[in-house]
Amino acid sequence: LYTYAYNAVTKMLKIDWDLPTYRQEEIPVYVPDESELDALIHGAKSRRMAAYLQTLKETFADPGEAIRIEWIDINEKQQTITIAHPVKNHLPRTLQVTNKLLAMLNCLPREGKRVFPMSYFSAAECYRTLRKRVADIQKNPRILSVELRGFRHWGGTSIAFHSNGNVLLVKKLLGHRHIENSMKYIGLINFKDDQFETVTATTVEEILKLGAAGYNEYSVIRINGTEVHCFKKPKRFSNYA
């Protein structure tokens, strides 16, 4: 950033110099536990902050993108929110959300076009205060490491795990233009089995239907001479596959 700024000065003053080339080092992303995200959401005293954090969790949006969401971007019939004003060269995208989030948003006053009529600076300041208070109440110092972007990092790793490492799905839902940005979320954390829908099949017709519906077979057991095929698919991201 310093060299870019100095480069602008040299152009203005017509000074000849060679702009150095730097390669940014990759910093491992900190992935919080979902219970820590929920603790922050539930600990918010402001309805607006609670809804903002829930939006970050369900849309995997960059904090700056969520700030820009407008009421017109919310489709209650389809249960979707469109990230129509992306930042950092991300792509626009539409995400499925829960009725819980829609209800939280509907409780907010409608003051203009934007759902969250606040600056990113003020949101970040309020969040830091909230984070410190929740970490003290929970006696969990890990919460102090959860940045606003941590909601997005958790989302990326969740998508990667539940889609069996489908990097293209991570790229699509996070709005990345380059697949290299999506690769860092592959294989970071594990999740519990209770986050899957499970079902069984005993006939070829049933097996074919489950495969077409996006279920993955993970086991075959024999009960009283009958082969029972066990299938599962993630609850949260199966609609995007």
Image (cartoon, rainbow, N blue to C red):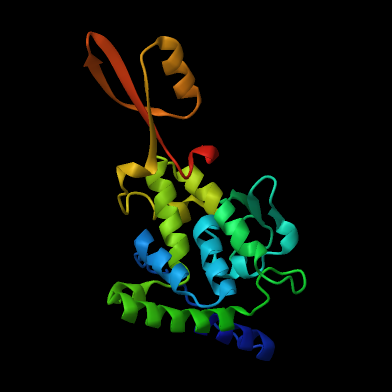
Task: Name which residue lies at 32% across and 81% down.
Answer: 136
Whole-percent x and y of residue 69?
67, 64
In the rendered image, the vertical position of residue 57 relative to residue 171, given as above or below: below
Q: Nearer the viewer, residue 10 or 214?
A: 214
Q: Nearer the viewer, residue 60 or 228?
A: 228
Q: Nearer the viewer, residue 40 or 172?
A: 40
Whole-percent x and y of residue 239?
54, 38
In the rendered image, the vertical position of residue 96 relative to residue 196, given as above or below: below
Q: Extreme right residue here?
A: 112
Whole-percent x and y of residue 229?
32, 20
* Residue 200 as seen in the image, left or right of residue 75: left
Q: Quadrant of residue 4?
A: bottom right
* Residue 214 as seen in the image, left or right of residue 5: left
Q: Nearer the viewer, residue 13 or 90?
A: 90
Task: Name which residue lies at 62% across and 70% down.
Answer: 67
Q: Extreme top residue here?
A: 225
Task: Name which residue lies at 65% across and 79% down.
Answer: 118
Q: Quadrant of residue 226?
A: top left
Task: Name which residue lies at 65% across and 66% down.
Answer: 107
Report how many numbered discs are placed on residues in the image: 0
Answer yes or no: is residue 48 visible.
yes
Answer yes or no: is residue 87 visible.
no
Whole-percent x and y of residue 216?
39, 29
